Amino acid sequence: MSATSQEQATSELISREYASSARDLRTTSELEEIVAQVAATDQWADRVRFRGDRRWYERIHHAPDHDIWIISWLPGQSTGFHDHGGSIGAFAVASGVLQEIRADGSCHVAERGKAFSFGPDYAHDVRNDSSALAVSIHAYSPPLNEMNEYELDNGYLVLRNTTSQDREQTIVPDPFTQGKKTTQRVDESNVSRLVASARSRLHRVSAREACNAVSADQNIVLVDIRPSSQRAEEGTIPGALIVERNVLEWRFDPTSSARLPVASSPDLRVIVFCSEGYASSFAAAGLQEIGLWRATDIVGGFRAWEAEGLPTNPPERF
């Protein structure tokens, strides 16, 4: 079937099954049914493209009360935390597996055939943490016309897309509690912008998430990059691999003659931590630069781990 014929077939399918009614909006259950039924067909297959520089997406249907999008995902691609303005929505995986991460740290695995829906002001991070390609179908009501991006910082979602004239940044508590919004001043120093840039590429994890992940998967490596003086002062984490920051890339580059035995594949998941979670963001971004696309760091570093009451070895103060 030609591309033109395929597009016509897709449009006819959608128009036949999901013609707009006289109502202003769709419900979440209706959106779930829409994305599930579109994902179950192969009418969209010839329209999909994959891009290495960013996720590919295309709107395949637009009506006054809802629209439908198709999105492709290479391994490691993600949305980052975002909302959908005032729209409600739903998505279903048509091929592969995706993960939906919420601000409270919970993770929902989205497999083919299962639809997820959400209300307005809902924020999440959707990602492809698998080694396979993925395709998903998304629907929004009213049609999507606004998205806001957030950075997860110590359990809060920090609005990222403020204008240069707006020097205050909205802090949104966990969206499931719908707490009152507050504001804080934005640190506009050069180093803060560099930290934000590094973190925008990472799927940062909480201390408890890191602990659970390492316990469940022997192929995940927890790496302590603090200098010896900090380890002696603060304590250590049992089982963490100690690789100080100045040699980190050499020890984990799979092509380096100085690499550690564990660093044999770019698919290795490395979770690094420092004292408070700042230097580790730069370190994790550096590991991604050399090809370890799953590298990330712990929000709040060792101090967050300790505050959670997770296992530690005591300081070795002299």
Image (cartoon, helix red, strand yellow):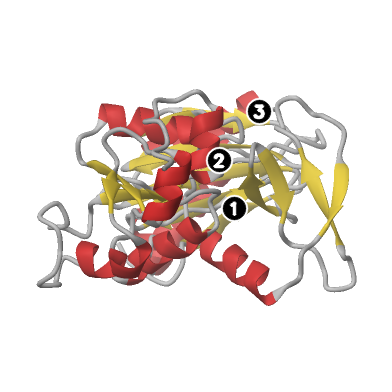
Q: Earlier in the sequence, mark 1 or mark 2?
A: 2
The CA distance from mark 1 to mark 2 is 12 Å
Q: Are marks 3 and 1 in contact (CB under 8 Å)?
A: no
Nearest to viewer (mark 3 / mark 1): 3
The CA distance from mark 3 to mark 1 is 17 Å
Give the quadrant of the C terminus.
Answer: top left
Q: Are marks 2 and 3 in contact (CB under 8 Å)?
A: no
Q: Earlier in the sequence, mark 2 or mark 3?
A: 2
Count the marks.
3
Give the residue pinned by disc 1: 61
Name the element at disc 3: helix
Name the element at disc 1: strand
Looking at the image, is 167 positioned above or below residue 115?
below
Give the residue pinned by disc 3: 28
What is the number of the mark on residue 16? Answer: 2
Q: Let me know if residue 9 appears in the view.
A: no
What is the number of the mark on residue 3? Answer: none
Residue type indicated by callout 3: Thr
